[in-house]
């Protein structure tokens, strides 16, 4: 995929605050005259979809970049975005840290709409979003119902749940417990807290079944179990080594807590009823972050939505791991996109 950067004029944030200019990072791939597939990425991913979803996106893959024009925008507030707490404040020459305006899901969608207009795209033929990417995709389908023609919302919800908010706050508490986090001396601040937060988050992304399947002890006579513990530490270290900073993580978890498609629209059901896209909603059987009961309920309020389910031992992360099942859901939709 090719990396691009769009610099816009003043950008007003939903929760207050303004930037005189905003730089938005995005990636594109495929023929510019192809059908438009827009993918909204998840929490710690980036706008280069072929980097984190290579089984599904790329030449000859289900989302074939030889046929489709694929677009993905970097989320505002992300460590991999050009606009967030880790980006440089032109007034000081240093990172913004907590001086960056608070970000909401609607701000992220607003930035994507700016990219859509910049590219001259009048219709998105198919939007795909999972997890926080699903938050954005649902919000966008309501914001611009005349633009989004087809949609797939997977392992996501129309509003943040108390359960998910509690998980987010627990992770922020881990960041705050690291004394270097509030010091704001450099972007390595809060790294120890970030490792802990990531380990906490992973428990909500996976499942009991998945851990028992992949992290069992190999020594039947071991004194202390340690394999799963070692895996948790590895995952925390891995995120820090990917140059994902604690400040961006903090901002993104707060953005998650802003998600409510019904805000100012008469409630969630009324907002979902505004969606005109041909919609497929996908739940994952062991997803503890967005249980299938929540995902199925969302589908009931979207006119004509088709509800599908992926069976997995891997919890929420099944959307990244169950490629055969996901391909079976995606392929008929993509074939239909090509017909029109």
Image (tube, rainbow, N blue to C red):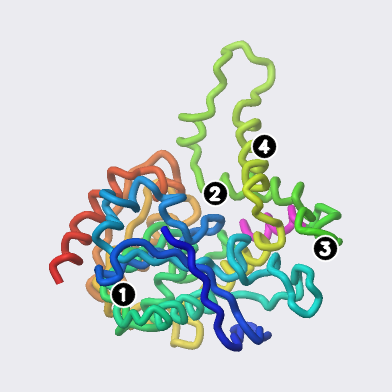
Foreground disc of the pair 4, 2: 4
Q: Indicate left or right for 312 with 60 as reference.
A: right
Seen as rendered, the residue at the extreme left is 339
Foreground disc of the pair 2, 1: 1
Circle 2 residues within 10 Å: few <14, some 14–19, many ≥20: some
The numbered dot on residue 124 is: 1
Residue range (magenta): 166-175
Kindly indicate whether the residue at mark 1 contacts the one at mark 3 (C-beta within 8 angstroms). no
- Going from the N terminus, do you reach mark 4 or mark 3 first? 3
The C terminus - image quarter: bottom left
- Going from the N terminus, do you reach mark 3 or mark 1 first? 1
Q: CA distance from mark 2 to mark 1?
A: 31 Å
Residue 330 point in image, percent of width and height: 26, 56
Judging depth in this view, the residue of 321 and 283 nearest the camera is 321
Q: Residue at x 35, y 82 (%)?
A: 120
Which residue is label 3 attached to? Answer: 184
Q: CA distance from mark 4 to mark 1?
A: 40 Å
- Going from the N terminus, do you reach mark 4 or mark 1 first? 1
Which residue is label 4 attached to? Answer: 233
Circle 4 residues within 10 Å: few <14, some 14–19, many ≥20: some
**Prevailing SS of the magenta stretch:** helix
Q: Indicate left or right for 320 with 18 as reference.
A: left
Q: CA distance from mark 4 to mark 2?
A: 16 Å
Q: CA distance from mark 3 to mark 2?
A: 28 Å
Kindly indicate whether the residue at mark 1 contacts the one at mark 2 (C-beta within 8 angstroms). no
Which residue is label 2 attached to? Answer: 204
The N terminus - image quarter: bottom left
Seen as rendered, the residue at the extreme top is 221
């Amino acid at each position: 995929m090719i990396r691009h950067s769009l610099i816009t004029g003043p950008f007003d944030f939903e929760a207050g605050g303004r930037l005189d200019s905003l730089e938005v990072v995005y990636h594109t791939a495929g023929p510019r005259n192809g059908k438009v597939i827009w993918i909204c990425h998840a929490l710690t991913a980036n706008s280069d979809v072929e980097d984190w979803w290579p089984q599904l996106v790329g030449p000859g893959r289900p989302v074939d970049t030889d046929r489709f024009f694929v677009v993905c925008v970097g989320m505002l507030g992300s460590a991999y975005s050009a606009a967030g707490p880790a980006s440089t404040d032109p007034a000081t020459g240093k990172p913004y840290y907590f001086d960056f305006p608070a970000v909401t899901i609607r701000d992220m969608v607003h930035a994507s709409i700016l990219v859509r207009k910049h590219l001259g795209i009048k219709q998105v033929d198919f939007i795909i979003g999972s997890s926080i990417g699903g938050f954005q995709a649902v919000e966008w389908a309501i914001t611009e119902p005349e633009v989004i023609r087809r949609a797939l919302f997977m392992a996501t919800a129309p509003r943040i749940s108390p359960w998910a908010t509690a998980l987010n706050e627990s992770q922020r508490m881990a960041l705050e417990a690291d004394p270097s986090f509030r010091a704001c001396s450099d972007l390595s601040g809060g790294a120890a807290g970030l490792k802990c937060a990531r380990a906490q988050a992973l428990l909500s992304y996976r499942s009991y079944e998945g851990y028992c399947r992949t992290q069992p002890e190999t020594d039947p006579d071991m004194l202390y179990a340690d394999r799963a513990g070692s895996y948790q530490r590895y995952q925390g270290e891995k995120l820090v080594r990917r140059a994902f900073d604690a400040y961006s993580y903090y901002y993104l978890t707060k953005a998650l807590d802003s998600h409510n498609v019904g805000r100012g629209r008469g409630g969630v059901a009324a907002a979902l009823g505004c969606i005109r896209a041909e919609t497929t909603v996908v739940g994952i059987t062991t997803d503890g972050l967005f249980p299938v009961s929540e995902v199925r309920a969302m589908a009931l309020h979207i006119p004509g939505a088709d509800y599908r389910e992926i069976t997995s031992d891997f919890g929420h992360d099944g959307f990244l791991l169950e490629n055969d099942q996901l391909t079976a859901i995606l392929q008929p939709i993509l074939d239909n996109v090509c017909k029109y």
